[in-house]
Image (cartoon, rainbow, N blue to C red):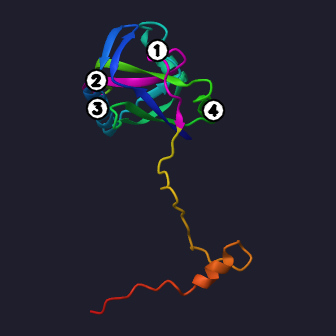
Amino acid sequence: MAKFKKKVLEEGRYQSPDGMIDITKDRIKHWAASFQKMKAAGLKIPIPWGHQSKASPDYDEREFYESKYNGGYLEDLQADKNGCLIAIVDIPKEDDAQRIGTTVREVSPQVETKWKDGRGKVWDDVITHIALVTHPVVPGQDNFEVYEDAPKPEGATRLSLKQKLSKGDSPMADEVEDLEGAVEEPVKKEK
C-alpha cells in the first residue's frame, strides 16, 4: 500500500469542459470539511484512472468502468495554510502505485453541485472523485509526493530495549550493557 500527497487545486477561475468554475479559499475549505463529514458517514471517495469519456454512460457500463479502473481512495482532503486543496491518496496495488508520479502526474477532481449517496443523503457542492489524468483542466501541477502517515520529527530516533542484546549482537551492544540498571523502576506509592 502506498500513500501520496498531491496539491489538487488552488484559488482561481478555470475553464472546464462544463463551463467556468470559480474556486475560492472558502470553497476549498468547504470541500475539505465536506470530505471529513462524508468520510465519517462511511463514504469512500475513489481515485479512478481518468474520467468517464462519455457524458452519461448507462448505469451498468458506468459501474463496470468505475470499479475496473479505480486506483485507490482518497484518505484525506485538507485546505493548507495557503488555501490550496491538498489530497492524501491511498493506492493499494503496487503496479498502480508505481505509475503515480511517473507516467501520471496530474489529477482532476469531479465536483458535483448536488450528489446523493447510497443512503439518500444529498450533499451540496462536493468532490465525488479525484481522477488520475494526463490532460487536466488545471495544467502545470506539481507532481505527487510520497506520503508517510506519521513522519518522524527531524533528528528523532526510535529505540527499543524490549529484547536484551548480547555483546557482539550490534555495534551498540556495549552501550546497551552499560545502561543496564540505569533505568529505575517506578516507585510504588504506599497506602
SS category of the residue bearing label 3 = helix
Q: Look at discs 1 and 4 and give the one toward the viewer.
A: 4
Q: Position of residue 171 (x, y in %)?
A: 70, 72
Which residue corresponds to the image point at 55% horizontal and 22% vertical from the top-left? 68
Distance of mark 2 from mark 1, alpha carbons?
31 Å
- Write down the residue under mark 2: 24
Query: Which of pointers 3 and 1 lies earlier in the amino acid sequence?
Result: 3
Q: Look at discs 3 and 2 and give the one toward the viewer.
A: 2
- Write down the residue under mark 1: 62
Q: Do the residues labelled 3 and 2 touch (CB within 8 Å)?
A: no
In the displayed structure, 90 sits above or below 174; it is: above
Q: Which amino acid does label 1 sit on?
A: Arg
Distance of mark 3 from mark 2, alpha carbons?
9 Å
Find residue 18 and name its label. none
- Write down the residue under mark 3: 29
- Write down the residue under mark 4: 98
